[in-house]
Amino acid sequence: MTSANHNVKTVYRMNFLGIAAAICRCDILISGGGSLLQNVTSSRSLYYYLYIIRTALFFHKPVMLYAQGIGPVRGRKAREAVKRILQRVDVIGV
């Protein structure tokens, strides 16, 4: 539906190889808006969004977090994972 309504290419959110391929072809990854980097509702969603950012960094793509709320992030390992990623992104706008 998004593809047809906005004339853009889309990838099913659980198609991890498709996501990686799309990121490989992009010029920049813009992640946002909302509080995507949090694990109060689900740890899986936190690691999903970290995967997307990490994939962009792997392909040496600029990463911008736009209109992004961060947290709450519970647990030492989760906080460390977010910290490592945030230190590597190019632009953060909250």
Image (cartoon, helix red, strand yellow):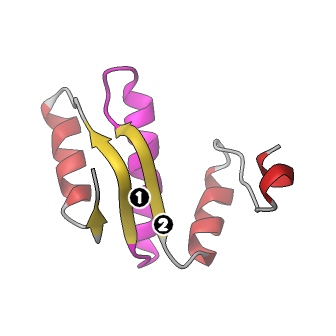
Main SS of residues in magenta = helix
The magenta region covers 37-62
How dense is the environment of label 2, judged by Cα within 10 Å: few (below 14), some, or many (20 and up)?
Answer: many
Q: Position of residue 2 (x, y in %)?
A: 77, 47
Instruction: Pick out the residue farthest to the left.
Output: 76
**What label sits on residue 29 in the rendered view?**
2
How dense is the environment of label 1, judged by Cα within 10 Å: few (below 14), some, or many (20 and up)?
Answer: many
Mark 2, secondary structure of its residue: strand
Instruction: Pick out the residue farthest to the right.
Output: 4
Q: In 3D space, how far apart are the residues under numbered discs 2 and 1 (Cα atoms)?
A: 8 Å
Q: Which residue lies under the disc numbered 1? A: 53
Please name whichever residue, 23 or 70, is drawn nearer the observer in this view of the structure: 70
Which three-letter amino acid code belongs to the residue tagged 1?
Answer: Ile
Q: Residue at x 64, y 42 (%)?
A: 14
Q: Indicate the quadrant where residue 46 lies.
A: top left
Please tell me whether residue 43 belongs to the stretch shown in magenta.
yes
Q: Position of residue 34 (x, y in %)?
A: 40, 39
Q: Indicate the quadrant where residue 45 lies.
A: top left
- Above/below status of 88 relative to 70: below
Q: Residue at x 17, y 51 (%)?
A: 83
Choose mark 2 or mark 1, whichever is in front. Answer: 2
Which three-letter amino acid code belongs to the residue tagged 2?
Answer: Leu
Q: Quadrant of the N terminus?
A: top right
Mark 1, secondary structure of its residue: helix
Q: Residue at x 47, y 55 (%)?
A: 52
- Above/below status of 78 relative to 65: above
Q: Position of residue 11 (x, y in %)?
A: 71, 53
Callout 2 touching callout 1 (CB < 8 Å):
yes
